[in-house]
Amino acid sequence: CRAGRGGRTRALEAASFLMRLKTSYSAREVAALTGLTARQLQGWDETRVFQSAIAPRRTSQGGFTERRYSPVDVLELVALAELRRRGFTPAVLRQMMDTLREYFRRRLSETLDDAGDLRLLTDGHGLFLRTRQGHIFDLLVDPQQPLVTGDGLPLSPVVGRARRKARSLKPEARSKNR
């Protein structure tokens, strides 16, 4: 029963991820889970693509504390890393995050499964939000105006799953993701 083993493997991977659930994660831990580099995380923090839950602070010795990420941050960064690998630029990711926050009053994590009222979708070129009622909004063009129809758009859900081997990218592929 091949399907049964695959299901068990996915369940074990999910259990392994949940056993590592902590109150906060370092940039190094987030990099390992997402495939992003610590430098990308720092750059995304500085350019407001994605800011860490706990910002670095200056210490009394003149250094800085480490930026820390919440479990929800990690989930969102996994999804953002996947979108980045699909070719979406950091500027587009920031626009999407700003649109979700400003127009829809939602965090990215609230759109990554079918449990909520809104679901994030992509066709590989654009980013869309589908409501429970079936309305589709183009997050990058006009988020206030639903599309007349979404029929025929080859949309697939955006998910937030940790990568099994985060560092499997070749060095030249890693440098392209910046």
Image: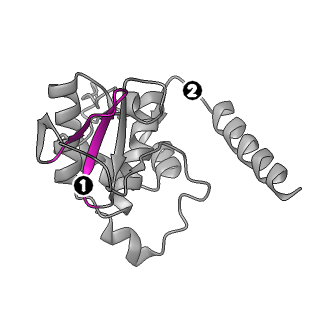
Where is the N terminus found, in terms of image quarters? bottom right
Q: Which amino acid, by three-letter code, is at mark 1? A: Gly
Quick check: 102 above or below 86? above
Q: Position of residue 97 (x, y in %)?
A: 23, 37
Where is the C terminus found, in terms of image quarters? bottom left
Left or right relative to 110: residue 96 = left
What's the distance in space between the residues labelled 1 and 2, CA to CA? 33 Å
- Asked where in the image residue 99 lies, by quadrant, the reply is top left
Mark 1 / mark 2, whichever is N-terminal: 2
Q: Position of residue 37 (x, y in %)?
A: 39, 56
Mark 1, residue position: 126
Q: Which residue is drawn at 27% across and 34% down?
A: 135
Q: Front-most of 82 and 135? A: 135
Q: Which amino acid, by three-letter code, is at mark 2? A: Lys
Mark 2, residue position: 22
Q: Can residue 70 be seen in this view?
A: no
- Asked where in the image residue 86 lies, by quadrant, the reply is bottom left
Residue that protrudes farthest toward the right in the picture: 1
Magenta includes 127?
Answer: yes
Bounds of the magenta segment = 125-140
Q: Front-most of 46 and 80? A: 80
Magenta includes 152?
Answer: no
